[in-house]
Amino acid sequence: MRTRTLLIAGTLGLTLGIVAAVTLLAPPPPETDGNTPLLHTEIGGVTAMRRRADGHEEVLRRTGDPARPIWVLEWADATGRTHLWPVATDRVRAALRVLSTTTGETGTARTDAPPDPAWPRLVLVSNDAERELVFEPGSLGGRARVWVDGRPRMVTSDTSDAFGRQSLTAWLDRRLLPPIPADPETPGRGGIQRLTFEAETGAGRARLALMRGPRGWSILEPLVAPASSERVGEALRAVQQLEWTRVAVGVEASEAGLDRPTAVLTMTAPGGGTRRAVVGSAVPGRGTVFVRLEREGGDLLVEAPREGLERLPLDPGAYADRRATEAASADVRTLRLRWLATGNGMPTEPTEGPDAGRGADPNRAADLTLTRAMDAWRIGVAPNDAPGDADTRAAINALVRLLTASEADRVSASPIVGAAPLVGVELAGSDGLAIGVATVYVTESSVIVRTGELWRSYDPQPLVPMIAWLASQTGEPESTPDE
């Protein structure tokens, strides 16, 4: 029994010895020359990037919510001035994706020489760990060397150039007024609440202010009126598509004309964040203008095309609601009409002086009152009212549609030349309180409705019967806009 045990132990020892000898004496497997990933890094975990080249360092840091990060670049220009400005998030995301998916050849990159300390270096910081890439300038046959944490690899020259030769400033957000991120402390209140545009015009300095409230957008300056959300949205998209072309280096504010700006664009968010573009003088020989971009954390002087800035309209009529009033047709239960011309065509309201064109005096008794009962219009006030005939019903229905539902062909803050006042109209609800006030004018080619300081122009053809009925009620000759 003892002999058998010794025999088994000896055999096992001999086998293990042979395996160990083979393992130790066998040559190591050759390193393959195939492609392997350049970096094994989760791009979502990268929180900072540092690039150093030509003695200058650029630092890119991630801030804000990781799900919706904001990347900010810190760098110094040729004059030594330090800047802090956001970069385009999609550019950073694309660059990180390239680094994480690019493969690098190992065998053809073997070398005993370390990289030159002066070569461009890129450091990725992720979870307090750092990965360093050193890019050798130049390339051969479309390939270039890059050291990853001290190990040489071969990549395409395009990849090497994108990180080795190109500054991170190429990733800067070039929009003049990018959207303002929503305030995390006020969820649901993102976007723009106020837009202001000031500019020098031939008539002096003009200012336009738009504000978003619970009921939509409104014009605040130079007049107060409801605004069209669609048209304000178009203006915001146009503003946010404006881009600058290059950073202006070594230019003083006075040289750039910023001490007397030609225009100022300001966007304000509900949480108080702002974006501001101050437009200065023209850049000699470039077709651009100096613009100082201001935001929380700093400012940046850039050059931007003059053309895009000059296309932004200052006329409040460009943003006004195309409807004359905010009242709904179904809510109108009473109309009070005040004639603005006598039977011989003479106006009953001032045509000269500060009150010219302001329409009928609302304190003056109505010349004609109409009430709606079961979708039929009655003339007069109960109990002395009487049903209107078919022409009356058609004319009043057309007048209500004009003031509540029809969209104007044109809106302007300037009076329409040649507009003759016809009638002042007060719309009232079921409680008898006014829900809309307007003045109707006619010209040779259009029907004009004035509300406040805005003048709206309409196609007269569908309104000819209405104008004829109104003219007949005033004793005017039945002259209507030209057909």
Image (tube, rainbow, N blue to C red):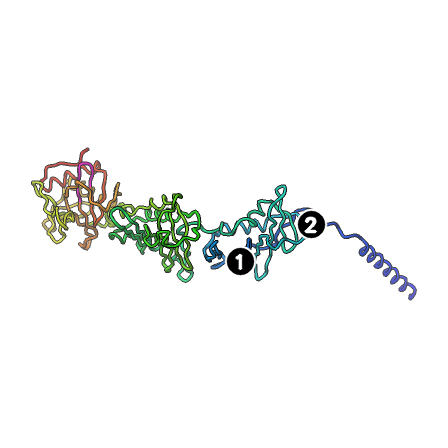
Above or below, comparing residue 23 to residue 342 in the picture = below
Q: Residue 108 carries which label?
A: none
Callout 1: SS: strand
92 with respect to 154 (left or right)? left
Residue lying farthest to the right in this orientation: 3
Q: What element carries label 2?
A: loop
* Residue farthest to the bottom, as pictured: 2
Image coordinates of residue 135 in percent, x first then y, are 60, 50
Q: How far apart are marks 1 and 2 (CA)?
A: 29 Å
Q: Quick one: label 2, few (<14), some, or many (20+) residues within 10 Å? A: few
- Dividing the picture into quadrants, the one containing residue 440 is top left
Q: Name the residue under label 1.
A: 48
Q: Which of 183 and 368 is in front in this view?
A: 183
Q: Which amino acid does label 1 sit on?
A: Ala
Q: Position of residue 281 (x, y in %)?
A: 35, 49
Task: Say which label, 1 or 2, has the lower sequence index.
Answer: 1
Image quadrant containing the N terminus:
bottom right
- Residue 458 in magenta stretch: no
Magenta includes 442? yes
Up/down of 126 relative to 475, above or below: below
Where are the magenta residues, as a range? 440-447
Asked whether, in this view, residue 85 is left or right of residue 349, the answer is right
Q: Write down the residue under mark 2.
A: 110
